[in-house]
Amino acid sequence: IPTAEQISRESLINKSAVMFDILRASSTVCTALANGCQAVLPVSEVADALALAQSLPEQTCLLGGERGAVRLPGFHLGNSPSEYTRPVVQGKTIILTTTNGTRAIRLAAAGSGLVIIGSLLNVTATARALVAAGRDVALVCAGTRGQFSLEDTLAAGLVIRQLLKLLPSGEATAPAAAPASDGPYAEERPLYKGRPLVLTDAAMAALRLAEYYSANPLQALHDSLHGQKLVQLGLASDLAYCAQVDLLEVVPVYRQGKITLAGEA
Ligand code: MLT
């Protein structure tokens, strides 16, 4: 479980990656797609977002995003999932630029495998898609300016917890080993409780965090630095929305510059 800043291309090769930015980019992407938006185009820089908007038909495209959690001047939408309602986004392409999340999506895609946008809203749908893909998994936490973030690690832990439910013990046929790219001695890690799964120490820590907060994920969002910033900005309702585990069934997938629902082009 690296933060986006720590990720290396090598550590993503042949893996399914999930990018988590719970507050709020991942939650916004999941909500927009659940409400019928056609595609989200994540862009790192504001200038690039504006230039991309110039090249797309005005009536089908919306500009969304934030800096400092505040909507950007001239943009149609900020980065609150509550703005991405069906009447607003259905059938639209959304160009999204956010401080950490949209950049992290592009970094998570460096291994060119499956890249899912994960949030608390779609934990089970994400875990099911990972099992179906049948590859090693990299859970990439966007973090806050490169630093560890509680809420992203919680989501990663909840996905691991769900993977453990979906992969019952006794199914392992061959000793699995963590790829060497996961660090020294990775290959010596044992299977987790007889499951076809090897957890790194970071994954184990995320799992324990998820167990701690599972009865009250909203508490984790309030405990987090970025959560507290959003509350100060009067956005506590975004925390309440983003904390709803498994509210949505969606699996947003990033491919060649665009996020769509799994199975859609
Ligand atoms: C980000 O990408 O840094 C966040 O989603 C910020 C926010 O809360 O809007």
Image (tube, rainbow, N blue to C red):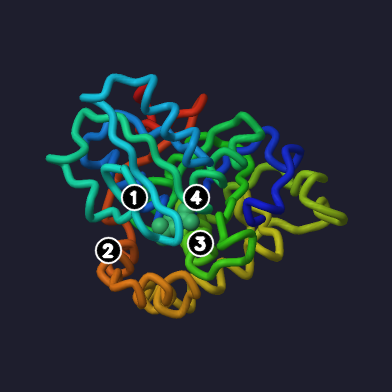
- Amino acid carrying mark 2 in the image: Tyr
- As drawn, is 87 to the left or to the right of 162? left
Furthest-front residue in this view: 73
- As drawn, is 23 to the left or to the right of 196? left
| Mark 3 touches mark 1? (CB < 8 Å) | no
Secondary structure of the residue carrying numbered label 4: helix
Counting residues from the start of the chain, the first of labels 2 and 1 encountered is: 1
Q: Quadrant of the N terminus?
A: bottom right
Instruction: Check disc 4 and report the residue beneath it.
Output: 101
Instruction: Name the quarter showing ligand 1.
Output: bottom left
Label 2 to label 1: alpha-carbon separation: 10 Å
Instruction: Check disc 1 and report the residue beneath it.
Output: 28
Label 2 to label 4: alpha-carbon separation: 18 Å
Asked if residue 93 shows in the view, the reply is: yes
Label 3 to label 2: alpha-carbon separation: 15 Å
- Identified at 52% across, 37% down, the residue is 115
Counting residues from the start of the chain, the first of labels 2 and 4 encountered is: 4
Instruction: Check disc 2 and report the residue beneath it.
Output: 241
Q: Residue 142 at what x, y percent from top left?
A: 55, 55
Instruction: Check disc 3 and report the residue beneath it.
Output: 152
- Amino acid carrying mark 1 in the image: Thr
